[in-house]
Amino acid sequence: MSNVNKAALALGTQRSVIRELFEFGKKRIAEVGAENVFDFSIGNPSVPAPDCVNETAIRLLKEMDPVVLHGYTSAQGDADVRKKIADSIFRSFDYKISPDSLYICTGAAGGLCGCLNGLLNPGEEVVVFAPYFPEYKVFIEKAGGRMRLIPADTEHFQIDFERFEEALGSNTKAVLINSPNNPSGAVYSEETIRRLAQILEDKSKETGSPIYLISDEPYRAIAFEGVKVPWVPSYYRNTLVCYSWSKALSLPGERLGYVAVSEEMEDHDEVYAAVAGASRALGYVSAPSLFQRVCAECVDDTSDITVYETNRNILVKGLRDLGFTCVEPEGTFYMFPQTLIPDDVAFCEKAKDFNLLIVPGAGFGCPGHCRISYCVPTQRAERSLDAFAKLAAFYK
């Protein structure tokens, strides 16, 4: 009998499907060459960080006292950093938020874990909409909660409100949304957010307890053709926003983001303190000092997302021409076409025969689809169409 935690052991000994594909891709590259492998498995930005990032990091390294630069900040993040973020939120969304309502976290994942562990009591439910980022289930269950999954609206990837309302109950503590969405690329419209907010407001009044809305937004900055990504706290007061610079500034390895606790939230001070306390218990305090300051200086910058839009256009047209059905992504660098057979796992396994690495939709709560992560060099997107054609021909 093992002496360690069984759930932790299972997570530590089984890689996610995405990570397994990523490792398989490295093996295939060694065997047949990088130019012959079309790895669309992982969401690792291929576009470099904007010049502001390296220039700011170099300047800070040269100018700041290294003891201060590399030392601990306040647990919730440096005060000046939080002030710069609050100012940016006001410029971007005309929404006033105090620096003391912001908690600097180690990426959006650290922020989500702080929110979930701060809000949930044992057995309380968090409603999640398919398709969803698979780690949500891990985060929710580790916080002692249960995930209540709403099936996908595969026609538009908006919210199926009929099923959503049926799922809400006295045990619902929070709703977790992700827009722009990983894996579908969908952006929740203003109409969707307004309706979601009204339902939550009505249900909160009915039960006498607030239902919190957690908005996971690492892809906020990656929206195409002028698509508007609503600032959720402007529509629903009991909102916590989890943001990350991993995608906006192409800094996934630096693990920097923030939690914004809506200024008008019921029991605002208690909720913020609970997020801070949970982050303390999890060890997520004093996020990396250098990159707190770098991100604060570059807070209004983004990487060149036109590359992702170009890749999207190439792949959407190319796959549709081959007979795939695909909802056109409005943001992120993912697309989520239907697989050519109902068994998406078998389909993605067959794709490996053509050195195409794509992720089955079943892991995202939406079987019959596959995720294609097109944050890759444009040449790879173009050259992959021949491999997709061979895959499609196999099933025809």
Image: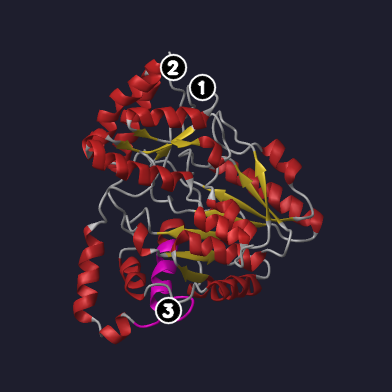
Indicate the colouring scheme.
secondary structure
SS type, badge 2:
helix
Q: Position of residue 216 (x, y in %)?
A: 52, 54
Expressed as whole percent of the image width and height from the top left, the position of residue 330 reads 43, 38
Q: Please tell me how crowded label 3 is: few (under 14), some (14-19), or many (20+) other residues with Cα within 10 Å.
A: some
* Viewer-side residue, 93 vs 256: 256
Q: Quadrant of residue 114?
A: bottom right
Q: Residue at x 42, y 27 (%)?
A: 350
What mark, if any, has residue 164 been given in the picture? none
Whether residue 388 appears in magenta in the rendering, the answer is no
Determine which residue is flagged by label 1: 341
> Which span of residues is magenta-colored?
71-89
Marks 1 & 3, CB-CB < 8 Å contact: no
Cβ–Cβ below 8 Å for labels 1 and 2? yes
- Whole-angstrom CA distance, mark 1 to mark 2, is 8 Å
Q: CA distance from mark 1 to mark 3?
A: 53 Å
Q: Position of residue 360 (x, y in %)?
A: 49, 35
Establish if 231 lies above or below 359: below
Residue 202 rendering spot, x and y as whole percentages: 74, 51
Mark 1 nearby-residue class (10 Å; few <14, some 14–19, many ≥20)? few
Q: Which mark is first along the chain, 2 or 3?
A: 3
Is 255 positioned to the left or the right of 169 in the image?
A: left
Report helix, strand or loop for mark 1: loop
Numbered tag placed on residue 79 in the rendering? 3
Instruction: First in sequence, mark 1 or 2: give its number.
Output: 1
Q: Amino acid at mark 3?
A: Ala
Instruction: Find the residue positioned furthest to the top.
Output: 396
Which residue shows up at 80% across the image and 54% down it? Answer: 206
Residue that carries the numbered disc 2 in the rendered image:
395
- Using residue 375 as the reference point, say whether residue 325 is left or right of it: right
